Image: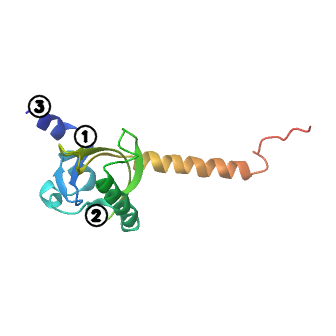
Amino acid sequence: MLGDAVLGAVSDAIVYADREGLICFWNPGAERLFGFAAAEAVGRSVDLIIPEPQRARHWAGFRKVMDTGESRYGQGDILAVPGLRKDGTRISLEFTIVPIHAQGGRMEGMIAIMRDVTRRFEETRALKRENAALRERPDTAPARQSV
């Protein structure tokens, strides 16, 4: 089937979690990104890839979306959050979500399409630090004009 071929070939991680937050689909991109084989991830909570400090906030938002059927992020917005790999390494993720509704409109779950942006995030953070340090040095600070 064409859909299966696309889901299996795409390099981004694609994860589907049901309304209880249990992983129901885990593509090869998710295996590469997070380090868990599909057999290790499917049937487990998405806590598997959410760092502990972010879990309470995640679940509050997730439950609200499942109860109301509405998300401010369901229109293709790109979110940035930390993620957790099997080896315990934290990574920076960008992702979009696709809410999944049943025929009656009830929320059935959520698909997340994720990409590792750790390198870009770290490079941007380093550039910001360098710029801040340069602004603080008197020999590189922009000249101030008199009024």
Specify the label residue 80 is tagged with.
Answer: none
Q: Is residue 55 left or right of residue 35?
A: right
Amino acid type of the residue that numbered disc 1 sits on in the rendered structure? Ser
Q: Secondary structure at mark 2?
A: helix
Residue at horizontal 41 percent and vertical 67 percent from the top = 53
Q: Which numbered disc, 1 or 2, marks the residue that appears first in the sequence? A: 1
Q: Nearer the viewer, residue 126 or 83?
A: 83
Which quadrant of the structure image shows residue 37? bottom left
Residue 86 visible from this viewpoint: no
Q: Which numbered disc, 3 or 1, marks the residue that appears first in the sequence? A: 3
Which residue extends farthest front? 104
Given contact means CB atoms under 8 Å apart, are the residues at marks 3 and 2 in contact?
A: no
Residue at horizontal 49 percent and vertical 47 percent from the top = 123
Residue 123 higher or lower than 34, as above or below = above
Question: In the rendered image, which quarter contains the C terminus?
Answer: top right
Amino acid type of the residue that numbered disc 2 sits on in the rendered structure? Asp
**Disc number lying in front (1 or 2):** 2
Q: Is residue 98 left or right of residue 141?
A: left
The residue to which callout 3 is attached is 2
The residue to which callout 1 is attached is 11
Q: Nearer the viewer, residue 139 or 53?
A: 53
Residue at horizontal 14 percent and vertical 35 percent from the top = 3
Q: Residues within 10 Å of mark 3 (few under 14, many from 20)?
A: few
Q: Residues within 10 Å of mark 1 (few under 14, many from 20)?
A: some
Amino acid type of the residue that numbered disc 3 sits on in the rendered structure? Leu
Q: For the residues marked 3 and 2, what is the alpha-carbon distance in whole angstroms?
A: 30 Å
The residue to which callout 2 is attached is 47
Q: Is residue 145 left or right of residue 132?
A: right
Q: For the residues marked 1 and 2, what is the alpha-carbon distance in whole angstroms?
A: 22 Å
